[in-house]
Amino acid sequence: MLVISTLFIIFAPLLNIIRMNVLKGTIVLFGKYYFINEFYVLWLFLLFVLFAFIFVSIVFGRVYCGFICPQTILSQIFEGLFEYIKKRMTAVSKPVIYAAVLIFMAGLSLFIGFNLIAYFIPPALIIRHAFLELNYLTPYLWIVAGAVTALIIFDMVLLRHKYCIYACPYGFIQFLFNDTRTLRIEYKPVDNALCKDCSNCTNACFMKIDPRKKALQIQCVNCGYCIDACRERFDSKNEEGENICYSFGLEEDKKNQTKNRPFFYKVSIALFLLIGSFVIFIAKFSSYHYLNQSIFNVNQAFIPSNKIIANKYKLIVENASDKTRRLTLKAVNPDLKLNFFSGRLVNIKPHESITAYPVLYINNGRNVEKKLKIGPYPVEFQILNSRGKVVSIKKTVFFITKK
Ligand code: SF4
Ligand code: SF4
């Protein structure tokens, strides 16, 4: 699980699963591009992740730390390496091996630093401006990657699992959702296989706790290493037994109806929010369209000499697809013959947005004031693709004023 989750975190921005482009104000979510005014789709997704986090914490405790967190896998790797060097290496080879581990750590940390930036700036741009074509972005990229590298080296050399035990706020927040029926480790000898005090379980625990204690321990991440260690101890002696197991609450808690009720309420509410947020997110995600149009009325003008009434608009069109789009604008009102002064055709490159100022006018001859009432007339702005198909519609108004 830790390897899969770490690979996912590394590849998520590279495979366009989730990333932002802060330079352009766009996000990519599961391969689809969104512009800044559609960021709510990202917030809906994050809301779903938040409710998933709450639900999982209520039911399974601190499993995020034990099964998903990259800090856990990095700590395991370097804890294992340092242990190995301490125990197996001779005094002569130790400094060389330590130096090699530090170089490996620095390289890995730098990669993680750039990988983190890839959540905010497209990976291709990072490679280009950090290594190939230096420009104004280069120092920022190296400063952020360097700061992350320094933090990871500090963390891995001095803290590792100590950070999870004493400092991680995320771990403690998960614990806040803990309940008497939340999944936990229980010391419960099966088949009277009494504890042999071999300390295998406590040695296996990287959070440095004794799983045999009855009291709930905030540091436990439900990794299950102690369960395996105890089972292996009995297996190695060809004995039947197992002293530690997973349990949704202690035996006495399971029977206590009053203690169980709040747990089921919490689980039901969290599940309702989780499913609700998922349905809303999927509904918005599936109604995605590559073209996004916004139109604003800028100003109006009445030009008596030419018998012309003109309205100027501001049009923003965003192209989230991978192709350049040649689009035509059409303005429709059943009572007015609307013409374009300018801004009828727009060309937009992939993942770009354009701002245009189309001007519409009516020329109603000499009787302009008699024929038309003063006021706003509804106008539908249609965008047609190169095959003449309407791909986007937005409504606004055409003003006819006295002056
Ligand atoms: S007590 Fe067991 S499950 Fe809990 S953190 Fe330690 S080894 Fe993992
Ligand atoms: S591994 Fe099992 S037998 Fe050994 S100390 Fe832990 S609980 Fe007891």
Image (cartoon, helix red, strand yellow):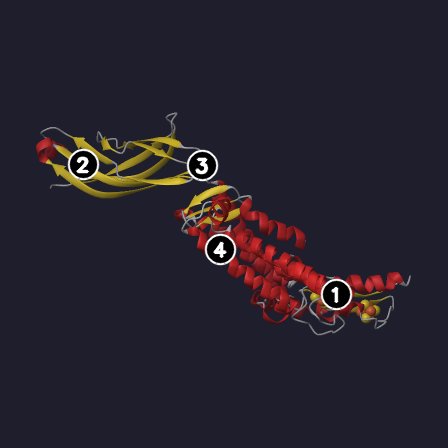
Give the x, y percent position of residue 394. 33, 39
Marks 1/2: CA–CA distance: 87 Å
Circle 4/circle 3 CB separation < 8 Å: no
Q: Which residue is mark 2?
A: 310
| Residue indicated by mark 3 | 321
- Image coordinates of residue 111 in percent, x first then y, are 57, 53
Left or right placement of residue 378 versus residue 60 in this view:
left
**Amino acid at circle 3:** Ser
Taking depth in this image into account, of 354 and 39 the one nearest to the observer is: 354
- Mark 4–mark 3 distance (CA, rounded to whole Å): 31 Å
Q: Amino acid at mark 4?
A: Trp
Question: The residue tagged with tag 1: helix, strand or loop?
Answer: loop
Determine which residue is flagged by label 1.
92
Answer few, some or many: residues within 10 Å of disc 1's Cα (few below 14, many 20 plus, some between 14 and 19). Answer: few
Res. 142 mark: 4
Give the residue type that dot 1 points to. Val
Of pointers 4 and 3, the one earlier in the residue sequence? 4
